[in-house]
Amino acid sequence: MRPTFSGNSTQLIWMVLATSLATFVAVPVVPTFVARIGKKNTFLVGAAGLIVMGVWIFFMPASLPIVIVTFFVFGLFQNLSMSLLFAFDADAVECGE
């Protein structure tokens, strides 16, 4: 039988902390990725990573160290793609002008 985290709010705190700390790692390297592979491809790499991590989260074992690492990597991909959304908005406005 697979162990669960239900009823233990401290697990959620670690998951949110890991995802939040990933912001400080991922966001500073976004300009480097954009310069090398472009805005669209950087966004797609992040989105593809989110899909893979979402599937992994569904199947991963309920071990706290694995959960923390998983949510850190999830945060890396999330920040890689989501930090570019506002850049796409600016591009759309510029194209409309």
Image (spheres, grey):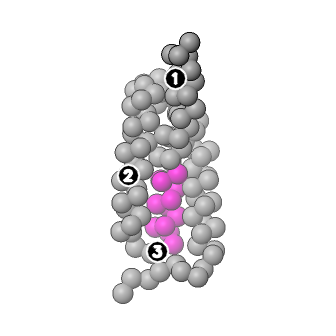
Looking at the picture, does residue 41 appear above or below residue 15?
above
Quadrant location of residue 42? top left
Q: Confirm whether residue 29 shows in the render.
A: no
Q: Position of residue 8 (x, y in %)?
A: 60, 80
Q: Is residue 67 magenta?
A: yes
Q: Could you tell me which secondary element the residue under label 1 belongs to?
A: helix
Q: Which mark's residue is nearer the viewer, 1 or 2?
A: 1
Count of picture labels: 3
In this rendering, would 9 be left or right of 30?
right
Amino acid type, residue under disc 3 in the picture: Ser
Please tell me the numbered disc located at residue 92. 1
For image coordinates 56% across by 20% down, the residue present is 93
For image coordinates 53% across by 34% down, the residue present is 84
For image coordinates 50% across by 59% down, the residue present is 71
Q: Main secondary structure of the magenta part?
A: helix
Looking at the picture, does residue 62 appear above or below residue 58?
below
Q: Position of residue 86 (x, y in %)?
A: 58, 32
In this rendering, would 79 be left or right of 40?
right
Q: CA distance from mark 1 to mark 2?
A: 25 Å
Amino acid type, residue under disc 1 in the picture: Ala
Q: Earlier in the sequence, mark 2 or mark 3?
A: 2
Q: Confirm whether residue 30 shows in the render.
A: yes
Residue highlighted by disc 3: 63
Please tell me the numbered disc located at residue 51. 2
